[in-house]
Amino acid sequence: MTPPDVTQLRRTLHAHPEVGFTEIGTAATVIEALRAAGCTVRYGAPVCDVTGLTGLPDEPELAAAADRALARGIDPTLVTALSGGTTGVVASVTGNLPGPVVALRFDLDALPVTESTDPAHAPAAGGFASTRPGYMHACGHDGHVAVGVALGQRLAADRDFPGEVRLLFQPAEEGVRGARALAAAGCCDDVDVLVAMHLGLGLPTGTVAAAAVGMMATVKLRVVFTGRPAHAALAPDQGRNALLGAAAATLALHGLPPVPGVVTRLNVGRLVAGTAANVVPARAELDIEVRADTEPALAALTERVATVLAGAAAMHDLTVETTETGRATVARHDPTVTAAVTAAAQRTSGVTTCRPEATMTASDDATVLMAAVQDHGGRAGYLLVGAGNPAPHHHSRFDIDERALPLAVDLLDHLVRDGNLAAE
Amino acid sequence: MTPPDVTQLRRTLHAHPEVGFTEIGTAATVIEALRAAGCTVRYGAPVCDVTGLTGLPDEPELAAAADRALARGIDPTLVTALSGGTTGVVASVTGNLPGPVVALRFDLDALPVTESTDPAHAPAAGGFASTRPGYMHACGHDGHVAVGVALGQRLAADRDFPGEVRLLFQPAEEGVRGARALAAAGCCDDVDVLVAMHLGLGLPTGTVAAAAVGMMATVKLRVVFTGRPAHAALAPDQGRNALLGAAAATLALHGLPPVPGVVTRLNVGRLVAGTAANVVPARAELDIEVRADTEPALAALTERVATVLAGAAAMHDLTVETTETGRATVARHDPTVTAAVTAAAQRTSGVTTCRPEATMTASDDATVLMAAVQDHGGRAGYLLVGAGNPAPHHHSRFDIDERALPLAVDLLDHLVRDGNLAAE
Amino acid sequence: MTPPDVTQLRRTLHAHPEVGFTEIGTAATVIEALRAAGCTVRYGAPVCDVTGLTGLPDEPELAAAADRALARGIDPTLVTALSGGTTGVVASVTGNLPGPVVALRFDLDALPVTESTDPAHAPAAGGFASTRPGYMHACGHDGHVAVGVALGQRLAADRDFPGEVRLLFQPAEEGVRGARALAAAGCCDDVDVLVAMHLGLGLPTGTVAAAAVGMMATVKLRVVFTGRPAHAALAPDQGRNALLGAAAATLALHGLPPVPGVVTRLNVGRLVAGTAANVVPARAELDIEVRADTEPALAALTERVATVLAGAAAMHDLTVETTETGRATVARHDPTVTAAVTAAAQRTSGVTTCRPEATMTASDDATVLMAAVQDHGGRAGYLLVGAGNPAPHHHSRFDIDERALPLAVDLLDHLVRDGNLAAE
Amino acid sequence: MTPPDVTQLRRTLHAHPEVGFTEIGTAATVIEALRAAGCTVRYGAPVCDVTGLTGLPDEPELAAAADRALARGIDPTLVTALSGGTTGVVASVTGNLPGPVVALRFDLDALPVTESTDPAHAPAAGGFASTRPGYMHACGHDGHVAVGVALGQRLAADRDFPGEVRLLFQPAEEGVRGARALAAAGCCDDVDVLVAMHLGLGLPTGTVAAAAVGMMATVKLRVVFTGRPAHAALAPDQGRNALLGAAAATLALHGLPPVPGVVTRLNVGRLVAGTAANVVPARAELDIEVRADTEPALAALTERVATVLAGAAAMHDLTVETTETGRATVARHDPTVTAAVTAAAQRTSGVTTCRPEATMTASDDATVLMAAVQDHGGRAGYLLVGAGNPAPHHHSRFDIDERALPLAVDLLDHLVRDGNLAAE
């Protein structure tokens, strides 16, 4: 079977978005395509250890994802293996020449964003918009996966390269939750060089940045305030109002001061409280993220967040429980990796500009894999491939210029074939 | 078929709670029992006109309710008739003597409250606790329906009473949404006397109050703030944060001042905002209720609520949309009705105390039906039957003393048979 | 010297408002008038023990009050005796007949309210408006003092009444701070009957209410949040922002729920925080009052206030210190006192209506004196004399109908002469 | 008379802090010292046009400052000229060589900060701490003035330098209010080069930075919310609570999002609301500052501030009035000025390090003068002289290492004598 074109694959994936740890259909597509291409493919729990992860969706949501996958006709054997959050896939191709283990990271998940139906939005016009209301590939991970698959197919077809290329398809980059599962399963233990890539980030098509600088360390928190319900008219004084505590905490958190010389971010991104108009809300759940471009600043800010949460709970006579659901660190770029990317970019057709670096004031748990590799003496990098986004990431009209897809495949192909990653 | 005992029926209903406008199984149970008993039973759209009602659940929720009913084995014909919110049932029995049209109101719906599993909680101990996680009859409406059905069975079996007794089974009392549907369908147009009853309200078993005083006029509002989403790290300044607006509004609303000489209540009972930790929340939905024990005070307070909402939206550069989802008014008790209740109570076995009135600092859209009857010259009343609640209404351990059920049936039976309601 | 007319005296007092514990000029006027009339007059520390009182103005403010009094030409000896907060005056007249010790309470202080200059405002039109910008007799205490003085003059001139009449002129009723000073000095220890009076409260001129019901127990709190200052641009993260804590506390306090069946009030009446735009505010001071119409409800609400304050401090990493600056309790009316007032009112010319009671949803630390007398077996009451206020109490256009002044003098004269207070 | 040593002068000034527009004693000291030294000295309204300035203290405060100056024995003629806010002084010395008009800016004012009395705080130990409780030179302006005076004395004594050196002593740098008064009076109209200097900013003694980069444009706002007072117990619903509006605004303002790539600051530095615990606060006054390191970002943020204020007012049914009390812009450093500073620093004894630039994340309205000079074709710069501060600026233990004072005098002396400022 002729492998589908990278653009076509991206469109298929785009039409079927799956959020973090539920990317069963996406993972199955990767598995089948790369198995067919001749890669060594592992998946599920052996490469994706979610034991102890606190950022997983709850059981009913995980079960519903499996049901959806079965309903879409995904191979039941795969569905079983990929259920429960273990949606990671690792595909390896070994080249004909000796060389290092080079890992490339691709992320699988989509977002709970409703896609635009405006005809000016290319996926809507092209008939490949999301088929799942309320969900959308609004961060370009559909493109990442397509690039990874196309690259695997090409490498398997022509093994004239050094060492092993290991394609890491990671669940749940959103919420920076999934990379840890691959690291926990040991996927990075013998990796010499790890490279992550992101499409877009505001760069025009044809521009490559050899290093994404300014990436922020981050912690994601799930916070639950618990009070006491009461009939809002008969006994309002008997209630302990978790919504008031959560609202006070939200305002206080957004009011935490900036830190000179450090870039920080704080967002209460989701708040769900109460059940009905006539009951004092007894429970409020918040999803919060904290970011800073240094680890000490992140630690200090996270401590202040904890102080605010405890104080807000005390203020309204509530209890509060906080769970860390995700974490990423800052990116350290090894110069040899950056140089290798630059060299590859210069050889890639369609790359009109190769910048040594570009600022990415965001987070990615690829940094967790990078740090894992660097901690045992390996090297790492994170590059950006411009894709002319018409709207910002996570926006309902986000899209990527599909011309960036074959360009990215070529770039990575050069990167692993050129041998520059092997050099110390 | 022997009619099930009132207690047994209450337990069956208790195990299958259905929230407002989705009481398909409950209504079907009523229809089948009273049709079997020989009552004239009407149901669905002809007696329950939900056209234009803004407090209905959304389409998927209504559809899911129908699916659940079918899955429970409810007669598909009934499910069809009762779907889409039209769950009202009106059962009539005409007595052998001339007399007025006397309507009695019973409400069908349960609450989104999770029932306690503590063995000290009688439904848990008795094996009839809610079988639907997250939902519960936590206001005693299961008992109301059981009493209404048992009364209908008894009246149909012995028609030695004046006039017509019309049993109104109303959907969605919670949120004070459903009574209007019965009024809109004309169910009150020819009613001479309307009596509503509530179990519990803190009165001990054996106590009856002939009039519930202090009932509050109320408005329920669904409020939606809309801002603009943005990536919380890359472009937080591009967002317009609906959660911050909603939090500010919540605090401001709860801070509105009391009004001397008037009892008021305000509750933001539910707030749902945002989608994920890393996105600036672009939408926030609030369920709010406003109450006052006079209509002018309710109007004044509702106006201040609107001011707060508009200001909070302006403050955070949002738009805000407010929909009225429910409304009830104050209760006017006609003395002849109160006197008839008192007389009936004195004849009812098990009634140890009959108080002329008891305070009920709550709301009920039975008041909408009462006002409809009174507006065309009829009379109305609202009585309370003590049921020894171990926990407050809307609490996860709410329960009723089942000895109150046959007592309530007897009381209402006396009320309609004694002929005192006919007197002017 | 002919004593000045009660109306003229009220106007003089109105023109020279003095706030709590600084009523040096007012007290001196009382002392001189009643000494001249032949009363036994005591004043200063012997009758007004402010030791340990936390609600006093600070030293500079007390000193400035003394300076102002001297500048107005008040007798320096009196100024010395009345300085430092000891502005209380007790004037006694003993009648020719045996009888009880009857104490009447009058309060001396004005308010920090700016008086209206509108010609429609009688004091402005009549040329006796406040001569002190920012201060005003906006609660009628000028009238109270004038009535007390006129009554003392009349009693001293005609001693044909039973027992001793003791006129208690109390500082600092606003903030319910001053009555305790008189009680602490023993002024109530031998009192058999204590009666307090208030003009106005919305009653029309000619109406007397024999008992003011619904008076609220109250606590006044001075709260100080302390954080850490910092340059708002160079090191905002080094600050600990006391204003943010105070703002959060203010919103949370105003959002505390109502208590069914109880009337409560909570007000953050004053907040002063920070020093300059470019410094993180390190200190915030709040004046808060809590009220409830039962002592248990006041205690419960005050406890929630403390919880909010501690939580708000914790939330923003501040310390908080709370001082009780004032306190009053509920009023218990002895029926014999109420009956005596009613009898006196019926004999008073100009009284067109004597109501057994009127609601006064406010507080007065006359209740502290009432409780002190009742605690040792005496009796007490609190009556209202209508004075046709054109604007609410504490308003810049508050005024009293001066026809109420001689009426009140007559009423109290009857009350102490009639002998009904002696009856058990 | 031998001029006092620069250190001694600084200590004298330190002991007598005066806040913005009330620096009468400080200005008089400057005038007398430089007049005695032979400089041409102008002062008061002719060099300091405060017409239309909105950031002046109010009349009573200005009058009190004049009284204080007279009480300290300041020459009444000077007091008259310097009263009403016109505290600016301009002293000129013309050199013996042709050359440009070079202006140096020194700021006169202190802060409303209470100075530490800890013996470890050098001014306390040395006996020259502030003699005015609540006020302190906590930003080093005492040192600036001393340096300016000492420089003027030296230049007047040895006129071997090119052109005119014009020493601008500016009132009210705090709040960025005073520079405009000098610009409005035309003091910059014929200036070829303007150089401003600041001591401290965290640099160690011996370090000079030729340019302070990152200085923020800023706007200072005085905001007044006006509601309606009411008795907090009798009629709380009749009030319109300005404090609640101010508190909501404060929280919302501090919650405005960061702007990627831009440094912004926002501070509500002062809030005064209400009068007494028992009155609904009808007025709240806030001092707010907004800063950004670009003018467009400042404009955008200021617009959002206005939106928040208007919304908060609307939310609580208040009116709001905003006055701009101060403004500064960003600093553009002309390279020739920076080069001249570097050259001078290299020749200055005691300067161990001369950095081309240092970051100063703060604001200074010297930038207003710089922009005025640059707008007509002149050049400008802003340099920093390290002074080993033991505590941050605006802190109660702020101090400067006095060894920096003669160093700064030497540096500026070199700067104006070397002739490098003349070069294009």
Image (cartoon, coloured by chain):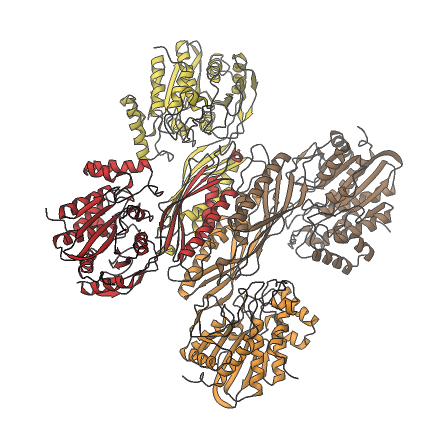
Chain colours: A orange, B brown, C yellow, D red
Relative to the observer, which residue lies in front, A14 or A275? A14
Task: Tell me: B238 left or right of A235.
Answer: left
Give how far across and how far down residue C393 sits, in percent. Answer: 48, 28
Task: Report the residue that reaches farthest toward the left.
Answer: D1
Is D12 placed above or below D420 here?
Answer: above
Is A379 placed above or below C421 here?
Answer: below
Give how far across and how far down residue C269 sits, in percent. Answer: 45, 37
Is residue C105 visible in the rendered image? The answer is no
Q: Quadrant of residue B59?
A: bottom right
Give how far across and how far down residue D146 sits, in percent. Answer: 20, 51
Task: Tell me: D56 left or right of B213.
Answer: left
Give how far across and how far down residue B293 sits, in percent. Answer: 63, 35
Relative to the observer, which residue lies in front, D171 or A25? D171
Is residue C193 visible in the rendered image? The answer is yes
How many numbered marks appear? Answer: 0
Q: Quadrant of the C terminus of chain D?
A: bottom left
Relative to the observer, which residue lies in front, D335 or A374? D335
